[in-house]
Image (spheres, rainbow, N blue to C red):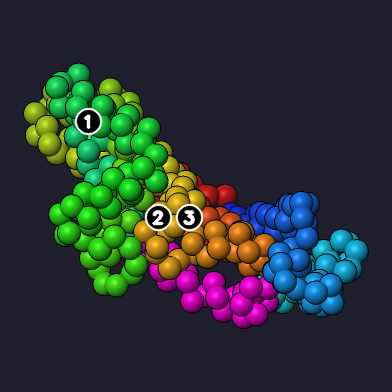
Amino acid sequence: MTGFLSYLLQRILGLFVTVLAVAVTIFLMVRLLPGDPARVIAGVLATEQDVARIRVQLGLDQPIVVQAGIFLRDLFQGDLGVSARTSAPVLAEIGARLPATLTLAAAGMLMAIAIGVPLGAWAAARAGSLGDVVVSTLVLFGISMPVYWLGLMLIILFAINLRWLPAAGADGPASLVLPAVTLAAFSVAFIARITRSSMLEVLRQDYVRTAHAKGVDRRTVEWRHALRNALPPVVTVIGLQFGQLLGGAILTETVFGWPGLGRLLVDSIFARDYPMVQGLVIVFAAMFAFVNLLVDLTYERIDPRVRYG
């Protein structure tokens, strides 16, 4: 078995262990929440018989050990249960909302990479200049800015005052612009900051000074040689930022009425829909772990010094 296959199997095993640990943790946390979810779901006018019937449907009449055993058995069979709010299979509802969230997260990530990496590299190549100061200030502003505040400001400016873009919903590409910009703002600033720091470190290396001494064009040294060697830590941050985007999607989808998993999670929490909350957290964890696995596997392609096994 080659070193790469051994490394890949170890990482896949680690991914399953991580998702399983998240599933057990969220199962216990949901059961420890105060209040009776059966009564919340039944409503204020429900009788005691209705509440008892819902409690049996959710399995809440069983000891927590039995509930945990049933939950893990169904999880290994790929069954995330039935939504207590809509009576539809959890996996089917998540599958219906997943494309909207992936579209929003992908648009935000592409925007963050397309702007953040060149901006950080450009600022590092001009460290100490007025342009570098302006970029550093914008980066600090972007990192400090709350997502929900930016979303509301964009709605007021571009949807209400200028009427250029829709304020909510998912009707066509135009409706993707404002939520994607809101979601990408923090990641653009963070990726630009990491790119600048990594690029500055590479530009101080001896081989860069040697290339300059040999008369190699400055743009070639900076963008073809230095930037490539500065990318490994940036790629790590990009993988972590994908998790940040999924977390940010909860607020962004709520502000813009985007029909994705984040909005579904908020609705499910308010409705005490245990199976749906558990299923969504497990899916979020699995996506985050899978993206980080892909990021780790790209290191060898970016940096030839990295070898697996």
- Can residue 113 be found in the magenta stretch? no
Q: Which residue position holds label 2?
A: 255
Q: Secondary structure at mark 3?
A: helix
Q: Which residue position holds label 3?
A: 250
- Vertical relation: 241 (above or below) 26: above
Give the residues drawn in magenta, as a range.
82-104
91 to the left or right of 246: right
Q: Secondary structure at mark 2?
A: helix
x 66%, y 66%: residue? 273
The label shown at residue 135 is 1
- Residue nearer the viewer, 80 or 38: 38
- Expressed as whole percent of the image width and height from the top left, the position of residue 240 reads 47, 46
Q: Could you classify mark 1 by the number of other residues whose Cα lies within 10 Å: few (under 14), some (14-19), or many (20 or more)? A: many
Q: Name the front one of labels 2 and 3.
A: 2
Check disc 1 and give the amino acid type.
Answer: Val
- Vertical relation: 275 (above or below) 299: below
Q: Could you classify mark 2 by the number of other residues whose Cα lies within 10 Å: few (under 14), some (14-19), or many (20 or more)? A: some
- Expressed as whole percent of the image width and height from the top left, the position of residue 191 reads 34, 40
